[in-house]
Image: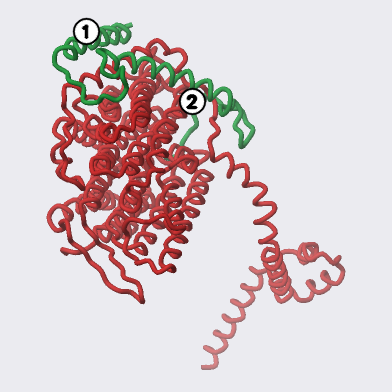
Chain colours: A red, B green
Amino acid sequence: MDNTPPVVIMLIAAALVVFLPSTLRRAVAVIAPALVLAHLTFFLEVGDSWSFTWLTLDLEPLRVDRLSLPFGYVFGIAGTLGAIYAWHHESKLQQAASLAYAGSSIGVVFAGDLVTLVLFWELMAISSAYLVWGGGWPNSQSAGARYLFVHIVGGSIVLAGVLWHLGAGGSTDFTLFDGTVAGWLILAGFAINAAIPPLHAWLADAYPEASITGSVFLSAFTTKTAVYVLARGFAGWEILLVLGVIMALYGVVFAVLENDIRRLLAYHIVSQVGYMVAGVGMGTEVAINGAVAHAFAHVIYKGLLFMGAGAAIHATGGRRTLTALGGIAGRMRSVVTLYMIGALAISAFPLFSGFTTKSMVIFAAEEQHIEWAVALLYIASVGTFLHTGLKLPYFTWFGPRREDIRVGPVPKNMIIAMIGGAALCVGIGVYPQPLYDMLPFANNYQAYTADHVVTTLQLLAFTAIAFWLLLNKLSGEATVTIDTDWFYRKAGKPVRLFVQQPLEWPFTQAARLARWIVEIAGRLSLTPESGWSRLLSAAGDPKTIIDHLGRPPLGAAISAIFVTFAAVALLAAAFD
Amino acid sequence: MIFSRLLLFTATLVLVLSGVVELLFVEHRHRLFLASNLTLYWCAFGFMACIGIVLVSKWFGHTFVMRHNDPYTGEPVLDEPSKSSHG
C-alpha cells in the first residue's frame, strides 16, 4: 500500500462506477478522491518512489516530493468537492470520466518519468473531452471535438519532444529541460494545456459547453497540471514571465467582452494561471512557492465560482448569459453568499485565500525589481475583482427583480460542496501557515503586513467605485467574441475539403464497392429467379440495380427454412 | 440604491481609515514606482486601472472581435437562454 501510486485508486474507481448501481456509484465517486487524500496523508511522504525498468526504459510511476505533494492534495480536495457537487448527476459516463480525469491529473503530478507523464497526459485529454460532450448544450458536441483535437495535437507535440529528448540520449527522468529543440517542443505542448495565448482558445471555447458539474472538474485540473509540469521542467525560463503577464491581462480584457457567465470565468482562469506562469518564469524560491500556493488556492476558489455560476444556470433552467439573468439574488441567497466568498478569494481580499497566495507572486516580482511586471499584475488584479467580484454577481443575481425568470431549487449536495470550498477559501485566507509549510521551499513570506492590507483595501475599494460609475457600460452584450480559435475553426472547412476528403476518397469508394457486391450477392441468393431477371433488365449503375432487386423476402426465406426443419423433424419422429 | 449607498459608504470609510493608518503606521515595503509610496496612491491606481481596463477592452472588443452574428454559423446571437438537455 505504501508505494501505490494514488492514480491507481482513481482508475479502479473509474472502472468500478460503470458496473455499480446509482447510489453506490455516487459514493465511490466521492470516496475515491477522499481515499487519495488519506493515502497522501498517512502512507506517502516526501522521498517516496516506485520505479522499474520496462524494455529499455526507466519508469517511475510514483515520485513524491515537495513540488508534487501540494498538487496531489489539492487535486484530491477538488475531486472530492466536485463529486459531492455532482452527486445528483445520474450519468455513469460523466462519473467515470470525472474520476479518470482527476485520476490522470494526479498521475501526471506524481509521474517521475516522461513516459508515464505522456501516458497520463493523453488520458487526461480523452477523459476530460467526455465532460464537454456530456454538456447537453447545442454546441457541446462540436466544442468537445475541437477540445479533443487541440489536446491531441498538444499531446502529440509533447510526445514528439519526449522522443526527441530520448533520441538525443536524454534520460526518462522528468526534470529541468534545457533550451534544445526537444525542450522547446515539450514547452509548446505544455503551453497548450496552460492556456498560454495564442494557444488558449480551447479553454474559453469548451468549458462553458460542458455540463454544469463537468465544468467544475475542468476548471481544476488541466491548467494546474500544466502549471506543475512548467514548474518542474521550465522554472526560471524568462519567456514564461512575459507570457504569464500577457495571460493575466489577456484574460481580463476578454472577460470584459463576455456575456456567457462560465466563459467569463474561463477567461479568468487564463488570467489567474498567468500569475502562476509568471511565477514559474521568475524561478526564484519565493516565486515558485507563490505559483504553487496560488495554484492550490485557485483550484478551490475557481471550483467554487464555477459551482456558483452552475447553480444559477441549474436553478434557472439553462440561462447562462448576463443578459438572460439578473434580479434573482433574493431567491437564491445561499448560492450568492457562497459565490461571493469565492469572488473575494480570487480578488485577494484580506482574510480570503487569494490574499495570502497571489500576493506571493507579485512580491517575488517586487523583490527582483521587475517593475513592469508588478504594475501589470496589479492592473490584472483590479480586472479580476471588477469581473468576478462585481460584474458577474451584479448582472447574474442583482439588479431589478425579474419576475420572468423562474428560479427552481438548488440540490442540497451542490450547496454542501460550495460550503466546503468556501470554508477552505476562508481557512487559507485566515490561517495560511499549513499551506505555506507544504510549499516546495522554506517560506519567509508574510501576507499580513499593514502595508499589504492597506494597499489591497485601497485598490479594491476604488475599483468598486469605478465599477459603479461605469455600470451602464458593463452590462452584458448579446455578442460572440472571436478569439484565436477562429483560425482553426475557419480552417476546418478547407482542411476537410482539400486534405481529409482526398485522403478518405479511395477508402470510402472501396467500402461502397464492397457493400454493393455483398448486397447484390445476398439478394441474388435469396431470390435467385426474379433477382437475375431484374438484374439483366436494369441499367449499369449499381444503385439502380439494387433498387431493381427489390426487398429481399428474408422473412419468407426464414419461414421456409423453419417449416422445412419442422417437417424433417416430424418425419424423423414418425420413422424413429 | 442600497447597493450604491453601501458602496459609497465603504469607499469613503476605506479612504479615510486607510489614509490615517497609512500615514501613521505603514512603512511601504516596495519602492518601485516613485509615486507608489504616496498616501492613498493605491486608491488612485485602482480607480484609474478599472476605468482604463473597461474603456480599452470595450474599444478593442467593438473594433476588432465582437460580432452580433455568430461568425461560424452566420446566425444572429440571441438574448434568449439556450437550453441544456441534462446539464
Q: Is residue A422 above or below residue A29?
A: above
Measured as percent of width and height from the top left, residue A336 is found at 29, 24
**Dot 1 lies on which element?**
helix
Q: Secondary structure at mark 2?
A: helix
Residue A405 locus on image (x, y percent): 42, 21
Q: Quadrant of the N terminus of chain A?
A: bottom left
Q: Nearer the viewer, residue A262 or A118?
A: A118
* Residue drawn at x 85%, y 72% as measured from the top left: A536
A317 or A563, which lies in front? Answer: A317
Q: Which mark is residue A334?
A: none
Q: Image point 27% across, 10% down: which residue?
A: B11
**Badge 2 amino acid:** Leu
Q: In terms of image quadrants, where is residue A390?
A: top left
Residue to which mark 1 is pinned: B16
Residue A290 visible (yes or no): yes
Circles 2, 1 touching at the beta carbon (< 8 Å):
no
Q: Which residue is mark 2?
A: A257
Task: Say if A530 sits above or below B44 in the image.
Answer: below
- How many angstroms separate mark 2 from mark 1 (CA)? 34 Å
Residue B55 horizontal side relative to residue A46, left or right:
right
Q: Chain of mark 2?
A: A
From the top left corner, tell me how far across and down residue A157 is, in percent. Answer: 47, 56
**Closest to the observer, A182 or A19:** A182
- Tell me whether marks 2 and 1 sit on the same chain: no
Is A252 displayed left or right of A307 in the figure? right
